[in-house]
Amino acid sequence: MIKRIITYLLPTVLLRTVSLNVARQPAKKGRLCSACALSLLLFLLVRSVSAAELPLVRIAHGAFNEKVAALWVAAEQGFYRKHGVNVEVINIRTGPQTMAAIVSGDIQIAYTIPGSVLSAAAAGMDAVFFGGIVNRADGDFVVPASIVRAEDLKGKRLGVQSIGGGIWSLAMLALEHLGLEPTRDKIAVMVLGDQPVLTQAMASGKIDAAYLGYTFSTLLKEKGFRVMLDIGKAPIPYQGLALAARRSYLQQNGPIVDAVLRGTLEGVAFMQKPANREAAVRSLMRHLRLSSAKEAENGYEVLQWLYNVDIRPNLKGIQNMQRLLAVTNPNVMKVKAEDAVDEEPVRRLEKSSFYAEIVGQLKR
């Protein structure tokens, strides 16, 4: 209503203000400047009111790495607003806290991993994935130079952010691929913190192994640490970070969900266009609190093959993660992986001319 009133009155106010100043033209040039200033003020007021009327969606993530970039740039570049939704991207430390915030209504969408969604679904929540942004495994399993063989990890200390979380999941997949099992091989799993904390713990000798995204593993490689396994090159079915919400929210807010998907997809496309490299690197430096562009460029390069415009959730990846998560939470096996996915929003997206345009741009 306020927007309509201001929009209706604005032309009249501007015309009257300019007319008065023109009529007094012999007086002072400053009056014309005042009219311009008033015009700008009213224009900005209309824009602010318009923005305030956009539906607010809070997207929460627990990850602290380059894989969140699509959301960050979509918000910074105005892609979400372009599609009619005001998105706030916020960090919540763990998956359980994120899902609790969805239940309370404090946030509407999670950018999270299968562990969070499957555990919530097993507890009775109507949680589902609706957009897979990172549909393949990536990152390095890093160890000190003194650890040469997989057997050398027996009896050592592994750092993770939380039990059942994304870093834990990838670390467990790495151990499995290397033929190791924490309990049998007496590998102590220590809950310490996110990737910057794990990087510091490795550098100080507090732990002997950790999964790290490529941006942070590069920092350790420069200090002499070695990569025992590049998980991105291992044939491991995986579902990484994906958009999730309550199924009831998706059903009741179709246009908002579509706007979020479109904005996020534009964020993915933005990161993959060479012309945007500088802006993308600056965004990564700011959000990851990196001190040099080189560090951010490593993460940027990773996203060139990690991101894809095919954003359907990876069902085989979810099933593989479900098998792994059952070790710590057997209840997740009560959930059918198919029931933890709602493909309708992506189907709508793929049928649109907008999607065809995005795909076409990246092929040029």
Image (cartoon, rainbow, N blue to C red):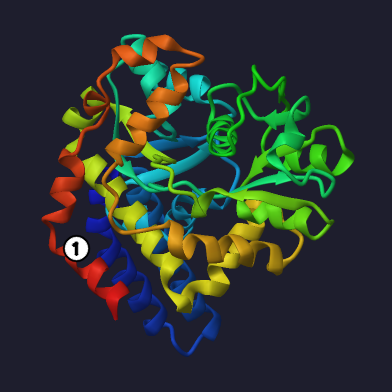
Q: Residue furthest left?
A: 351
Q: Residue at x 45, y 50 (%)?
A: 71
- Which element type, helix, strand or loop, lies under badge 1? helix
- Which residue position is annotated with label 1? 354
Q: Residue at x 41, y 79 (%)?
A: 21
Quadrant where the N terminus is found in the figure? top left
In screen coordinates, is 305 left or right of 7? right
Using the image as rendered, state which of residue 89 and residue 267 is in the foreground: 267
Mark 1 closeness class: few <14, some 14–19, many ≥20 residues within 10 Å: few
Is residue 156 visible from the viewing direction of this image? yes
Location of residue 174 with respect to 4 vertically, above or below:
above
Q: Residue furthest right?
A: 204
The image shows residue 31 at horizontal and vertical percentages of: 50, 77
Location of residue 8 with respect to 319 vertically, above or below:
below
In screen coordinates, is 278 left or right of 87? right
Is residue 106 visible from the viewing direction of this image? no
For the image, the number of numbered tags is: 1
Using the image as rendered, state which of residue 314 and residue 52 is in the foreground: 314
Residue 187 figure quarter: top right
Quadrant where the C terminus is found in the figure? bottom left
Q: Residue at x 33, y 78 (%)?
A: 19
**Mark 1: amino acid:** Phe
The image shows residue 280 at horizontal and vertical percentages of: 54, 66
Using the image as rendered, state which of residue 3 and residue 264 is in the foreground: 264
Residue 149 figure quarter: top right
The image shows residue 288 at horizontal and vertical percentages of: 65, 51
Using the image as rendered, state which of residue 36 and residue 292 is in the foreground: 292
In screen coordinates, is 146 left or right of 27? right
Location of residue 292 with respect to 83 vertically, above or below:
below
Location of residue 85 with respect to 41 vertically, above or below:
above
The image shows residue 285 at horizontal and vertical percentages of: 66, 59
